[in-house]
Image: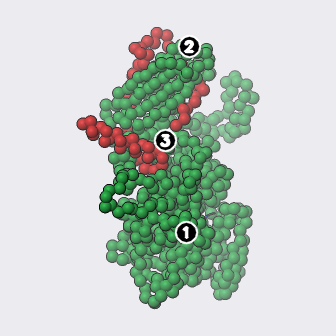
Chain colours: A red, B green
């Protein structure tokens, strides 16, 4: 998908903000909802290919 | 494709089409070598082929010819049978075939008692057999057109088609020499038909697919995310569809006839059948013009009947039914836990969606930002009657080369059931006037993981050090009661066009706003040059772990950090 263009600017870095490697992890994502993706269209087929490939891949590793 | 083994019989080449199979009409479509879906006209030139079979002295009629037999030969004419497939008699609604061959209990299934051979005998022909004959006729029309034998198809079916119904349809098609490669849901087919157009841009959006047919209306709310589709809710209505609109005109003309002739043409089945066919034609004309005529030869007692009706009158008579179409959509949106303002697009599908008033009502119902994709609201809209068949044809072209096993594995819940984000993920930006942060969504909620989104953000005008603050966000609806305009010292002329909108007091203005949730991470990008931009990538893994990368566009290096997956993973509804 194409990148989203945002014209409003990012905030200025607060004085004294300092973190190792300039990155500060703070939280985690909320839990997810299990849903069905419709098995239709080119993007789904690409997803299915990746997912099936990955599954056999990780099973091989075990 | 796997290499051929010794002794293995070569399977015939797959020639696949898309089929939409409705209770009222069916369509066949193929995908051209340029990847464009096209609807195929049958020998009679019809692209919308009535799902009707009729028998006269052992001869089989199909489509429009069969439908016209509803007047003289209704007992040997089978119509509106799709929804009976794979159902037991006790659970079905017999009303749609009231004026054609009646559905009867036949063991554990449903059959029609018809004279389908040269003999006088009435045979019990099961709904499966009827379906086989119908699919055979469709496939034969497609084969004629394609110049090669069509032997496979993707068929679109309603979202509430049961597993038993799917099996029955697969079997019935097989008997007709058509292997069902996949059954796809009708709303998804409609979305795919639009997304497959070369000018389509893949964007994250919430789409309502409103399929208004002949005997039923079905609505689905679909989250479209990076070209993948998840159905959030569905709604079905068997009392609001084309048949109810036909009835409005039947009643209107019957009353007019009674006034002059003192007989009610609805009392006589043959007269009613004629009137129904003609009223439907009149209704379709009213979708195009402001006036339409009705002509019925020998409607009752040998009297001919001719009349006209204008669209305004029709819209007045049908106002209540039209309002119900909007209500079905409202219901589906509510079921999806969404607000009307969340809907980016409404795709109108099905024959009844040609009706201008229905889409105009929707245009008024939704916000001006919602795109209503229908012939009367958007010149580039695709013919709503063709959407399901087109989508099925596109899917057919995508999978016709696959092995059966490949298709089965790809459509298996192991692959299709996927975690979807509960909240949006976005980045904080600053607005010009207030010194308050504003959330900008990068990944929308209901996006299936793994997923990746990229945003390019402006930096302060003079450049310098900036902070990338990644947060979860939840959409909220802000309701403002607009009282008499308080200008807060601003020049009133600035708001002059608002003024005129707000003449009524107490008007409610509803708008979508973001509520910032959990802060996920912060990253610093230092020394951004004047006029520079920052590219932020959020990558959510299958386990909901997050990788954030940020860098100045065109600069080397940048920041990369990871967030652990959440500790608890709840199970939502699939
Ligand atoms: N141009 C038009 N204007 C208004 N109504 C139309 C128009 N064309 C078709 N229709 C109506 O659309 C209905 C058929 O829609 P469609 O072909 O989508 O039905 P279907 O999905 O096969 O049927 P069902 O809902 O019974 O399963 C009929 O009531 C028909 O009169
Ligand atoms: Mg339909």
Q: Nearer the viewer, residue B248 or B378?
A: B378
Residue B243: quadrant of the picture: bottom right
Which chain does the numbered disc 2 sit on? B
Which chain does the numbered disc 1 sit on? B
Q: Which residue is mark 3?
A: B225
Q: Secondary structure at mark 3?
A: strand
Verify CB contact (< 8 Å) between mark 1 and mark 3.
no
Which chain does the numbered disc 3 sit on? B
Residue B181: quadrant of the picture: bottom left
x, y percent for residue B389: 53, 59
Residue B324 seen from this side:
no
> For residue B144, which numbered disc appears in the image?
1
Residues behind callouts 1 and 2 on a single chain: yes
Residue B359 vertical placement versus B563 (above, below) = below
> For residue A22, which numbered disc appears in the image?
none
x, y percent for residue A18: 43, 12
Q: Which residue is mark 2?
A: B464
x, y percent for residue B359: 62, 54
Q: Residue at x 44, y 61 (%)?
A: B13
x, y percent for residue B67: 56, 75
Question: Which numbered disc, 2 or 3, marks the residue that appears first in the sequence?
Answer: 3
Residue A32 vertical placement versus B117 (above, below) = above
């Amino acid at each position: 998908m194409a990148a989203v263009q945002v014209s409003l600017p990012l905030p200025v870095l607060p004085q004294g903000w300092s973190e190792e490697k300039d990155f500060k992890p703070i939280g985690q994502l909320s839990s997810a909802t299990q849903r069905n993706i419709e098995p239709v269209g080119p993007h789904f087929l690409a997803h299915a290919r990746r997912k099936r490939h990955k599954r056999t891949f990780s099973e091989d590793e075990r | 494709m796997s290499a051929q083994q010794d002794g293995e019989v070569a399977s015939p080449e797959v020639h696949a089409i898309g089929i939409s199979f409705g209770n009222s009409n069916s369509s066949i479509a193929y995908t051209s070598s340029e990847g464009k879906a096209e609807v195929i006209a049958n020998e009679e030139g019809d692209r919308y082929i009535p799902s009707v079979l009729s028998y006269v002295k052992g001869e089989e009629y199909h489509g429009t010819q069969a439908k016209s037999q509803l007047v003289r030969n209704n007992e040997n004419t089978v119509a509106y049978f799709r929804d009976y497939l794979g159902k037991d008699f006790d659970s079905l609604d017999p009303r749609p075939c009231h004026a054609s061959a009646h559905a009867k209990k036949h063991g554990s299934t449903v059959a029609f008692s018809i004279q389908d051979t040269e003999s006088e005998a009435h045979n019990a022909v099961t709904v499966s057999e009827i379906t086989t004959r119908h699919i055979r006729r469709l496939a034969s029309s497609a084969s004629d057109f394609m110049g090669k034998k069509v032997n496979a198809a993707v068929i679109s079916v309603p979202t509430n088609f049961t597993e038993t119904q799917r099996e029955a349809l697969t079997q019935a098609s097989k008997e007709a020499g058509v292997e069902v490669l996949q059954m796809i849901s009708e709303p998804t087919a409609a979305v795919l038909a639009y997304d497959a157009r070369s000018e389509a841009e893949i964007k994250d959006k919430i789409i309502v697919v409103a399929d208004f047919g002949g005997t039923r209306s079905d609505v689905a709310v679909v989250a479209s995310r990076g070209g993948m589709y998840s159905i959030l809710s569905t709604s079905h209505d068997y009392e609001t569809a084309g048949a109810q609109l036909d009835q409005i005109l039947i009643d209107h003309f019957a009353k007019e006839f009674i006034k002059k002739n003192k007989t009610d043409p609805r009392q006589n089945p043959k007269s009613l059948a004629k009137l129904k066919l003609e009223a439907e034609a009149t209704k379709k004309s009213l979708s195009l013009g402001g006036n339409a005529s009705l002509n019925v030869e020998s409607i009752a007692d040998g009297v001919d009947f001719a009349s006209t009706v204008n669209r305004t009158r029709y819209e007045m008579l049908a106002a209540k039914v039209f309002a119900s179409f909007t209500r079905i959509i409202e219901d589906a949106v509510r079921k999806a836990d969404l607000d009307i303002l969340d809907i980016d697009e409404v795709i109108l599908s099905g024959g009844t969606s040609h009706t201008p008033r229905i889409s105009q009502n929707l245009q008024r119902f939704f916000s001006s930002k919602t795109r209503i994709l229908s012939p009367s609201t958007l010149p580039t809209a695709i013919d709503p009657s063709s959407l399901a068949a087109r989508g099925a044809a596109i899917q057919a072209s995508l999978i016709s080369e696959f092995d059966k096993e490949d298709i089965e594995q790809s459509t298996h819940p192991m692959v299709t059931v996927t975690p979807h984000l509960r909240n949006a993920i976005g980045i904080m930006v600053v607005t010009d006037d207030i010194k308050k942060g504003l959330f900008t969504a990068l990944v929308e909620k209901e996006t299936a993981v793994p997923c990746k989104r990229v945003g390019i953000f402006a930096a302060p005008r003079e450049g310098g050090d900036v902070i990338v603050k990644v947060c979860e966000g939840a959409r909220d609806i802000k309701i403002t009661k607009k009282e008499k305009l308080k200008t807060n010292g601003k020049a009133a002329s600035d708001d002059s066009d608002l003024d005129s909108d707000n003449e009524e007091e107490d008007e409610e203005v509803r708008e979508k706003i973001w509520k910032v949730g959990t802060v996920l991470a912060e990253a610093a990008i230092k020394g951004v040059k004047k006029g520079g931009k920052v590219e932020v990538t959020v990558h959510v893994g299958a386990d909901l772990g997050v990788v954030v990368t940020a860098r100045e566009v065109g600069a080397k290096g940048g920041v990369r950090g990871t967030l652990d997956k959440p500790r608890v993973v709840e199970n939502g509804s699939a």
